[in-house]
């Protein structure tokens, strides 16, 4: 890819604006809560876009186009099944407890609802995981820019990390959130023309359907049997594993996204944040997945486009960037590249700000230094920004040296995360569940995940304890690991809770269903009422699935 | 109070101006696989979007 002067100019213009927003917001930070939780003051449309953008890292954009090329429109299930229902659920049903509890973070909610050890377990694994995943995506970005632009790995990693550092250091969470909204616009406007050009060159949706195997243009028709579709999953594994356990586990408990909604300026706004975000979320496949399908269709029709080869197959990860170089002239190419950079930064800033809050409030203030004046925690929050980014950079280099360790760590974090949703579900909706129950449930769920992985085999992965079952794909294996982990956590939490002493009702006010006041909104118009809005968004989602059945 | 619609609007207007002038003054800058003047069309899109954000910020305070 050859960049012209104008492309660099556009990239520089973008840097000026993100840094400028950080600079403007600097004056709004005077307490640690301003810096780490935005002081609950951000308008709803901005928190919604940030909710979406924080999850929309560069790896996601590149990876979704790659999966689109590999599996077809079925990839959209990661949005339609794997995100939209959970986003509606967290807004309508769970946000009253997160926002109403006045907890400053998700681990802190666990402390208020259960006990110290449950919070500690969640805070420490979450902090380690965010640093790790921002390091991994930094590594991916460095590799990509090296491959596509010929930039040095070190230069692109350090430059992007430095920009994120400056604007989060200046304006804290508010700055990260405001920039995420700008980044979201840029991602959409930077990639949508590419999707349009690639798909219309391939003859529109009908052209895609004619040039691709049937299985790639139907999202549900081939899910009855794992052997019929390229993902190797069947409908129960997909809906229960991805649609329920993994998706609800991520969207409803991951502080990275929940933090954005908790920064909203009222309870109603916090509840509508993820619900509103679900609307653009369900349309994202048309921007990020369709180009992948178009790439394969163009290749099948001698259009002059071809995916680069890798070993015996194709390098699907390059679908998006090669399309960009073929369809974008100098100028728009700069915008596309900047959009890629923006998606990387939004993902990274999401990790950094979530790490900051959990580190400062849930680890530092809880275990290292209690009862210091607030200005001390503000200073710690700022220092943590630098320290967290430095750790991410170190992780990126570690990933470059020891790829196997990274795979292993990713696997272990997967085990720890899988059961989380069972804990929150019981904590929020079953008054009788106890801290001992939650803690042992989480451990049992993690153990069940590791055990399932050890006893099953898929594409040569797992099976180190003997092979009881073989899955057609690692994706199916992951879905089933999640299902077993969730079930184990759910059952053990209930069993242990029944034999341990529950917290008195007075301590659970604002934390559990039945003991929390949910403000009445009958006098509002329907789109300002979270539940009504949720129903409308859900209907739109169902319609989309029927259209692409 | 800081209104994000203003800086975002300005950003997209500037982006649009750069792209439209590329499309007008250097229409021969084309990508390999398309004959469309991509810069001109996308530039107009950006200008419209940026203008829309600025209009919104004027309308609702």
Image (spheres, helix red, strand yellow):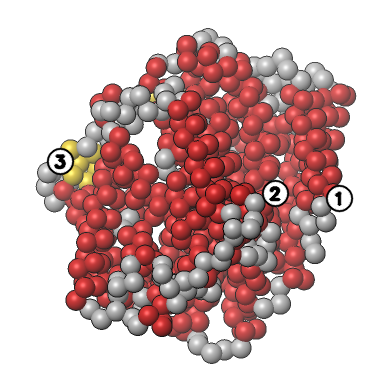
Residue ID at (64%, 68%)? A40
Residue ID at (59%, 58%)? A522
| Residue with the mark numbered 1 | B58
The quarter of the image holding the N terminus of chain A is top right
Answer whether labels 2 and 1 touch (C-beta < 8 Å): no
Q: Nearer the viewer, residue A103 or A362?
A: A103
- Callout count: 3
Q: Nearer the viewer, mark 3 or mark 1?
A: 1
Seen from this angle, which residue lies furthest front? Answer: A523
The chain letter for the residue carrying disc 2 is A
- Location of residue A325 by image quarter: top right
For label 3, the crowd category at 10 Å Cα-Cα, with few meaning under 14, some 14 to 19 and many 20 or more, is few
Up the image or down, A461 lies above or below A20; here it is above
Earlier along the polypeptide chain: callout 2 or callout 3? 2
Q: Which of marks 2 and 1 is in front?
A: 1
| Residue with the mark numbered 2 | A182
Up the image or down, A252 lies above or below A545; here it is below
- Location of residue B18 by image quarter: top right
In the image, is A491 to the left or to the right of A547?
left
Q: Can residue A260 be seen in this view?
A: no
The chain letter for the residue carrying disc 1 is B
Up the image or down, A140 lies above or below A509; here it is above
- Location of residue B39 by image quarter: top right
For label 2, the crowd category at 10 Å Cα-Cα, with few meaning under 14, some 14 to 19 and many 20 or more, is many
| Residue with the mark numbered 3 | A469
Q: Where does residue B54 sit, x and y in percent of width and height?
A: 83, 46
């Amino acid at each position: 890819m050859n960049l012209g002067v104008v492309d660099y100019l556009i990239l520089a213009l973008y840097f000026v604006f993100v840094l400028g927003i950080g600079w403007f917001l600097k004056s709004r930070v005077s307490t640690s809560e301003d810096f780490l939780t935005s002081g609950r003051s951000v308008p709803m449309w901005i928190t919604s876009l940030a909710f979406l953008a924080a999850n929309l890292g560069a790896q996601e954009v590149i990876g979704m186009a790659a999966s689109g090329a590999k599996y077809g429109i079925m990839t959209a299930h990661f949005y339609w099944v794997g995100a939209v229902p959970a986003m509606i659920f967290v807004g309508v049903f769970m946000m009253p407890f997160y926002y109403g509890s006045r907890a400053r973070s998700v681990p802190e909610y666990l402390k208020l609802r259960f006990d110290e050890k449950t919070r500690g377990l969640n805070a420490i694994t979450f902090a380690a995981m965010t640093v790790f995943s921002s390091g991994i995506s930094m590594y991916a970005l460095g590799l990509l820019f090296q491959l596509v632009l010929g930039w040095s790995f070190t230069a692109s990693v350090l430059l992007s990390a430095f920009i994120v550092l400056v604007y989060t250091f200046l304006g804290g969470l508010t700055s990260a959130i405001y920039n995420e909204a700008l980044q979201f616009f840029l991602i959409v406007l930077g990639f949508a023309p590419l999707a349009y050009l690639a798909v219309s060159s391939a003859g529109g949706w009908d052209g895609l359907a004619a040039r691709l195997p049937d299985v790639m243009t139907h999202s549900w028709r081939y899910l009855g049997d794992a052997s019929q579709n390229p993902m190797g999953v069947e409908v129960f594994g997909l809906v229960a594993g991805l649609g329920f356990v993994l998706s609800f586990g991520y969207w409803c408990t991951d502080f990275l996204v929940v933090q954005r909604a908790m920064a909203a300026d009222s309870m109603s706004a916090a509840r509508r944040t993820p619900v509103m975000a679900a609307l653009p979320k369900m349309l994202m496949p048309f921007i990020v997945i369709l180009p992948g399908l178009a790439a394969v269709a163009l290749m099948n029709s001698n259009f002059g486009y071809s995916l680069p080869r890798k070993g015996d197959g194709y390098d699907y990860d390059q679908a998006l960037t090669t399309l960009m170089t073929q369809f974008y002239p100098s100028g728009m190419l700069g915008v596309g590249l900047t959009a890629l950079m923006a998606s990387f930064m939004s993902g990274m800033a999401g990790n950094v700000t979530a790490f900051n809050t959990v580190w400062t409030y849930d680890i530092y203030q809880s275990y290292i230094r209690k009862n210091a004046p607030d200005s001390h925690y503000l200073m710690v929050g700022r220092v943590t920004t630098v320290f967290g980014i430095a750790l991410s950079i170190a992780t990126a280099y570690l990933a470059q040296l020891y790829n196997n360790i990274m795979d292993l760590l990713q696997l272990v974090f997967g085990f720890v995360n899988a059961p989380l949703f069972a804990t929150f579900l019981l904590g929020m909706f079953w008054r009788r569940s106890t801290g001992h129950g939650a803690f042992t449930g989480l451990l049992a769920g993690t153990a069940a995940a590791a055990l399932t992985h050890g006893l099953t085999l898929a594409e040569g992965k797992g099976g180190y304890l003997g092979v009881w079952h073989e899955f057609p794909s690692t994706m199916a294996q992951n879905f089933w690991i999640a299902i077993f982990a969730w079930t184990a956590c759910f059952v053990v939490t209930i069993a242990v809770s029944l034999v341990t002493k529950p917290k008195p009702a007075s301590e659970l006010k604002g934390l559990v269903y039945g003991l929390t006041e949910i403000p009445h909104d009958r006098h509002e118009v329907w789109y300002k009422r979270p539940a009504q809005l949720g129903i409308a968004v859900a209907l739109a989602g169902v319609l989309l699935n029927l259209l692409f059945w | 109070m800081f209104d994000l619609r203003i800086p975002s609007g300005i950003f997209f207007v500037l982006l649009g101006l750069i792209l439209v002038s590329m499309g007008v003054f250097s229409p021969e800058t084309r990508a390999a696989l398309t004959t469309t003047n991509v810069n001109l069309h996308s530039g107009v899109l950006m200008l419209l979007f940026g203008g829309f954000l600025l209009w919104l910020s004027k309308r609702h305070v």
